[in-house]
Image: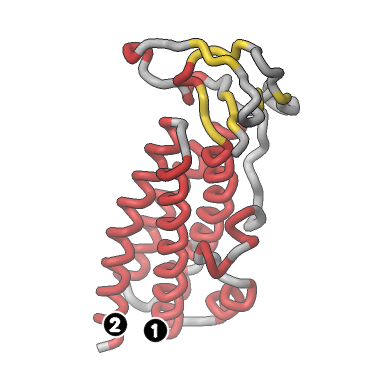
């Protein structure tokens, strides 16, 4: 596992917990991010890196870089609902997804830029590389959704979005197991809690529409 040292203030912990100098060792490479647009570097063994709470792991970076494109696809799917959905609850659900995930993309993108990393664009990245593992819709599924109208759209949208949310829950669980940065851990917990609730609501809505 590669450790990453954050230089962004937003990634620091509560100073009241005390600050302990961190020294790079030989057990795992430690990446010190550069300024915006600059490449990071590998710390040399014995180098003083700052306080313990400034530390974050590669899992934190991977989570943000995977969740940004994952959220972007959800926004793309939700943007189709106003003109294609028949059920007003489906339209309202899509609006809530857009309202919730748009700001989360901004937070994660800003967090990555503070580390000198560009936020992913489009649907590329770790999540898209394993669509079955993380619930990303395939190109064919997205084309079917764009072509659907009325009740057909509602059912397909709910099916795809349930799977998409389940993938986000799995991604968040991985971050909660392996991450260290407080901002990303809080983001993962919020995503996990919120999307579990939405999964239950979508399942109930799909059953209601099918009756």
Residue at the disc numbered 2: 209
Q: Kindly identify which numbered label has been placed on residue 151.
A: 1
- Where is 116 relative to 106, above or below? above
Query: What residue is at 46 percent from the left and 65 percent from the top?
Result: 164
For marks 1 and 2, give the CA distance.
Answer: 8 Å
* Residue 78 in the image, given as x and y percentages of width and height: 46, 63
Q: Would you identify the image quadrant in which residue 159 lies?
A: bottom left
Q: Residue 11: percent from the left, percent from the top?
A: 48, 25
**Picture quarter containing residue 129?**
bottom right
Q: Which image quarter is the C terminus in?
A: bottom left
Disc 1 crowd, CA 10 A, few/some/many (<14, 14-19, 20+):
some
Mark 2 neighbour class, 10 Å CA radius: few under 14, some 14 to 19, many 20 or more: some
Q: Residue at x 38, y 58 (%)?
A: 95
Residue 147 or 10: which is nearer the viewer?
A: 10
Q: Quadrant of the N terminus?
A: top right
Residue closest to the eye, 193 or 81: 193
């Amino acid at each position: 596992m590669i450790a990453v040292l954050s230089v962004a203030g937003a990634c620091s912990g509560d100073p009241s917990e005390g600050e302990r100098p961190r020294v790079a060792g030989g057990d795992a490479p430690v990446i010190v991010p550069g300024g915006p647009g600059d490449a990071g570097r590998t710390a040399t063994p014995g180098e003083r890196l700052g306080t313990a709470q400034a530390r974050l792991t590669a899992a934190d970076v991977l989570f943000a870089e995977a969740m940004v494109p994952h959220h972007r696809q959800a926004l793309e799917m939700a943007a189709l609902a106003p003109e294609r959905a028949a059920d007003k609850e489906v339209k309202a659900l899509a609006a809530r997804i857009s309202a919730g995930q748009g700001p989360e993309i901004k937070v994660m993108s800003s967090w990555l830029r503070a580390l000198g990393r560009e936020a992913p664009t489009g649907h590329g990245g770790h999540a898209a590389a394993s669509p079955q593992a993380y619930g990303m819709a395939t190109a064919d599924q997205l084309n079917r959704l764009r072509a659907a109208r009325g009740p057909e759209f509602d059912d397909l949208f709910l099916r795809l979005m349930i799977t998409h949310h389940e993938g986000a829950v799995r991604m968040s669980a991985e971050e909660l197991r392996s991450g260290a940065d407080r901002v990303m851990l809080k983001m993962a917990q919020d995503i996990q809690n919120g999307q579990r609730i939405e999964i239950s609501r979508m399942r109930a809505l799909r059953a209601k529409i099918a009756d």
